[in-house]
Structures are given as structure tokens and as C-alpha cells.
Amino acid sequence: MEVIADFYVFMFSVVVISLSGVMSPGPLFAVTIAKASKDKRAGLLISLGHGIVEFPLMLLIYFGFNWLFTLTPVQKTVSLVGGFIMIYMGIQMLRSKGENKEEPPFSKHSSLVSAILATGANPYFILWWATIGAALVTNAAFFGPVAFAIFSVTHWSCDLLWNTVVSITVFKSKRFWTQKVRNTVFGFCFLTLTGFGAWFIISTLL
């Protein structure tokens, strides 16, 4: 019974820590806002794209490969490549700020792809899993493989919950957007992505 109680306490901490990280403004948040302005399912697709990167990463840490992400060459490579990807995405969003038409059906998967890029290209995301995330995975592994699976799904569910809330809120409110508001929103997304991208690139030189 004590082990079960400890596991419940651990899972509570997982939810709190996960939500604190998910709700912090960053590249993925900017992508969610931009995509949700045209697609109410953006939160789901972005969460799926995020999970495509995150679940394998959690498995690598579970099997003891988290040391790979602490290597300087790996960190610098992710920062450099990720920085250019972020800047590219920011420029693309700025170019689309004047487009008020709905996205055609064939482009719906762009939310999924954008999430994969924004997640995999973010060195802070890799660093978080190499430190805080690795500690959580280690604690989850202590309770066994089933507990690790529950932990993994719970953590990702926090991403899904937050991205869905943001997505629906943005999509429902878009009818009130004037062109000025739209320009401001996409300007924020542009500054967020390019700002992070520039910092990632600069960090490789420090």
C-alpha cells in the first residue's frame, strides 16, 4: 500500500511539473496559436507531432541513453540546426499573416509537421529531458515498466490538454480578429520563433 501511495504522489508531481513546462511560452506555443487560427484540430495534431518526438526520447532515457543529450557536440548541433529551422518557421508565419482564407484540406497535416520541427529543433526541450525529464523517468522506472508507461501517457496528456485548450480558444475567438489583431498575433509568433532561433544559434558560439 505504501508503494501505491508513493506512486500516486509521484504522478501528482508529474502532472504539476509537466503542466508548468507545457504552459511556458515557447516555440511550440507560438506554432499552436498560428495553426489554431485556421484549424480547430491544431491542438490535437500538434500534440501528436510533439509525441512523435517525445515518446522515443522517453524510451531512450528509460533504457539509459540520456547521457547522449549531455554531449557538447550533440547540444551544439541541435542548437545550430534548430536555430535555423526556428527562423525559417518564423519567416513563413510572418508571410502568412495576411492570409484570411481557410486552409485547404490537403494542408491540414502542416500542424503535425510543424510540431515535429518545433519540438525536435528545440535544444531546451532536449536539455529538459536530459535533466528534469531524466529524473522523472528514473523515478517512474523504479515502480516498473507499467508505471513508466502510465507516466509517459500522463505527461503527454498534459501537452494534449494544454494545446487543445489553446487551440480551441484561439479558433473560437478568431471571428473577432481584425487585420490589426491578426498582424499582432502572427507578429508575436514571428518574434518568438526567430528570437529563440537566433538565441539557439548564438549559444553555439558562446
Image (cartoon, rainbow, N blue to C red):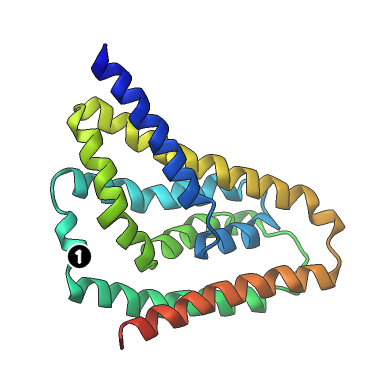
Outermost residue toward the bottom in this view: 205
User: What residue is shown at x 33% (from left), y 57% (from top)?
Assistant: 128
Q: Position of residue 70 (x, y in %)?
A: 20, 65
When asked about the image quadrant of residue 35, the answer is bottom right
* In this rendering, position of residue 203 left or right of residue 66: right
Quarter placement of the N terminus: top left
Task: Identify the residue under disc 1.
Answer: 70
Residue drawn 19% across the image and 74% down it? 72
Q: Could you say where residue 109 lies in the image, as x and y percent from the top left? A: 53, 55
Number of numbered callouts drawn: 1
Corner quadrant of residue 152:
top left
Q: Amino acid at mark 1?
A: Thr
Residue at (25% x, 25% y) in the render:
146
As drawn, the residue found furthest toward the top would be 1
Mark 1 packing: few (<14 Cα in 10 Å), some, or many (20+)? some
Q: Examine the rendered structure and indicate whether residue 206 appears above or below residue 82.
A: below
Residue at 55% across / 44% down in the picture? 44
Q: Position of residue 86 (x, y in %)?
A: 47, 74
Up-down relation of residue 3 to residue 131 (above or below): above
Question: In the picture provided, is 2 more to the left or to the right than 158?
Answer: left
The quadrant the C terminus occupies is: bottom left
Q: Secondary structure at mark 1?
A: helix
Q: Position of residue 193 (x, y in %)?
A: 53, 73
